[in-house]
Image (spheres, helix red, strand yellow):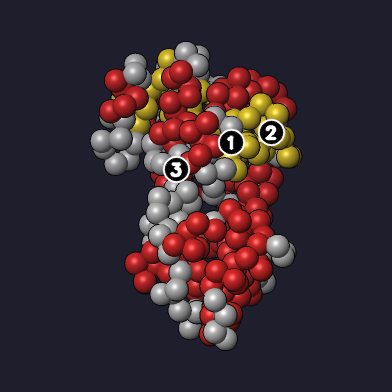
Amino acid sequence: MKVAFLGLGRMGGRMARHLLTAGHDLVVWNRTPGRAGELTAAGATEAADPAAAVRGADAAVLMLFDPRSAADVLAAVIPAAAPGLLLVNCTTVGPEPARELGRKASAAGLRYLDAPVIGTVGPAEAGTLRVLVGGSEADLAAARNLLETFGDAERIDHVGPVGAASALKTVFNLGLAEGMAAVAEVLRYGTELGVDRGLLLTELAGGPLGFLVNYKRTMLESGDYSPAAFTVTGIAKDVRLATEAVAGRLPIAEATLGLAAAAESAGHADDDFAALAAADVPGPA
């Protein structure tokens, strides 16, 4: 299959490599130049722009940062794509943006799957991401072999029509962000009471926040929040998608955005989201 892969960030580059290893004829594009070198050395072709990438392609995978970047790329793809191109959007965009992108793709005669992934750079490297899929069963069947190159075959889950997968992805990431915000606040509270941080982490590890504490304990103990599996800026973007989807009805999410803004101001924008609990991050104003 000839596949265009659009977006070679920390996740996308790893996902694209699995497509190449599986034997697909791969054309890649990235908004910021300079990230395709490893892939082109292994046999991929680099395109100058999204339109060039999708010409003659059977399928295209989008792995971009946000709804705006996905919309910009889709606008460039539509005039150049052959009718029936299978467009798999792995970007986390939120439910209504996903539906709008799907409507535009469908109106142009393209097949569209809303397919955000759950997992960070480790699963992307291993090809074991969970893939949530919104769209038709027929389009999922057509895309399954492609999805199985970077996703766990047992965890490629059809969850409903276009938009349903993005809705579920934002639910998942909202829980992840709010959970880490809770870890941050409890650690701050215990520290202000004079409790040793190591003892705090040991106690929290056995309680309801245990998953996140155990997952990020090395970072929480050392204060070194790199390399990032999921950045503060990235998780803040996903929380913002949730607050935009149901404006004014997620007060804990709004507080979490304030904490993320404080972390970014403290220099942790590109650090792992565990830096929400960094000692130098004040509570949101």
Q: In the image, is 168 to the left or to the right of 52?
A: right
**C-beta proximity under 8 Å, tags 3 and 1:** no
Q: Position of residue 222 (x, y in %)?
A: 44, 62
Q: Amino acid at mark 2?
A: Arg
Separation (CA) of disc 3 from disc 1: 16 Å
> Are there few (<14), some (14-19), or many (20+) residues within 10 Å of tag 1?
many
Total labels: the figure holds 3
Q: Amino acid at mark 3?
A: Leu
**Residue at the image position 62 percent from the left and 36 percent from the top:** 131
Q: Position of residue 26 (x, y in %)?
A: 41, 20
> Is there any visible trace of residue 10 in the rendered image?
yes
Separation (CA) of disc 2 from disc 1: 8 Å
Q: In the image, is 255 to the left or to the right of 269?
A: right
Q: Nearer the viewer, residue 97 or 120?
A: 120
Q: Which residue is mark 1?
A: 129
Q: Earlier in the sequence, mark 3 or mark 1?
A: 3
Q: Which residue is mark 2?
A: 155
**Residue at the image position 35 percent from the left and 31 percent from the top:** 29
| Residue 234 position (above or below residue 22) | below
* Outermost residue toward the left in this view: 34
Instruction: Nearest to the eye among marks 3 and 2: give it.
Output: 2
Q: Earlier in the sequence, mark 2 or mark 1?
A: 1
Q: Which residue is mark 3?
A: 64
**C-beta proximity under 8 Å, tags 2 and 1:** yes
| Residue 267 position (above or below residue 40) | below
Tell me the quarter of the picture where residue 241 sits.
bottom right
Separation (CA) of disc 3 from disc 2: 22 Å
| Residue 164 position (above or below residue 267) | above
SS of the residue under disc 3: loop
Q: Position of residue 225 (x, y in %)?
A: 42, 58
Q: Amino acid at mark 1?
A: Leu
**Residue at the image position 34 percent from the left and 67 percent from the top:** 267
